[in-house]
């Protein structure tokens, strides 16, 4: 169940700062998952206690690519992102997970 809800962790500068300073971790989650399902998936997969879950729907972006035959316009699909706040003292080691 946790593998279907948690798609991948977000690795960016902002996500790294949140995890180092405030014990918050960012994941891309299934679009149909709610906060309770995300909380249960994180607790089951990593064995930590979740304090709060904030979710946001990220819109898709349009992309342009120039080719010999002209400009090709496309769209990247949107996704749902969740920011997980853990209780004090709990951490998730995302890099040594597998």
Image (cartoon, rainbow, N blue to C red):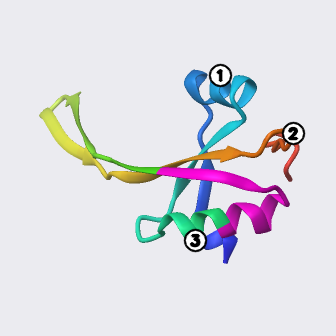
The residue most toward the bottom is 1
- Of the image marks 3 and 1, the number of the one nearer the N terminus: 1
**Compared to 47, does 70 lie above or below?**
above
Residue occupied by mark 1: 17
Instruction: Name which residue lies at 41% across and 71% down.
Output: 32
Other-residue count near label 2 (Cα within 10 Å), few / some / many at <14 / 14–19 / ≥20? few
Instruction: Name which residue lies at 13% across and 32% down.
Output: 71
- Residue 45 in magenta? yes
**Of the pair 89 and 7, the residue shown nearer to us:** 89
Question: Does the CB distance between marks 3 and 2 fall below 8 Å?
Answer: no
Residue occupied by mark 3: 37
Q: Nearer the viewer, mark 2 or mark 1?
A: 2
**Left or right, residue 42 beside residue 61:** right
Instruction: Name which residue lies at 71% across and 23% down.
Output: 21
The stretch of residues the image draws in magenta is: 40-54
**Compared to 60, does 50 lie above or below?**
below
């Amino acid at each position: 169940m946790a593998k279907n809800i948690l798609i991948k962790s977000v690795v960016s500068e902002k996500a790294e700062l949140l995890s180092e300073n405030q014990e918050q971790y960012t994941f891309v989650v299934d679009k149909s998952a709610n906060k309770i399902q995300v909380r249960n998936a994180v607790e089951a997969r990593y064995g930590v206690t979740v304090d709060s879950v904030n979710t946001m729907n990220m819109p898709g972006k349009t992309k342009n690519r120039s080719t010999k035959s002209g400009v090709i316009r496309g769209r990247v699909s949107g996704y749902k992102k969740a920011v997980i706040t853990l209780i004090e003292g709990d951490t998730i080691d995302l890099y040594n997970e597998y």
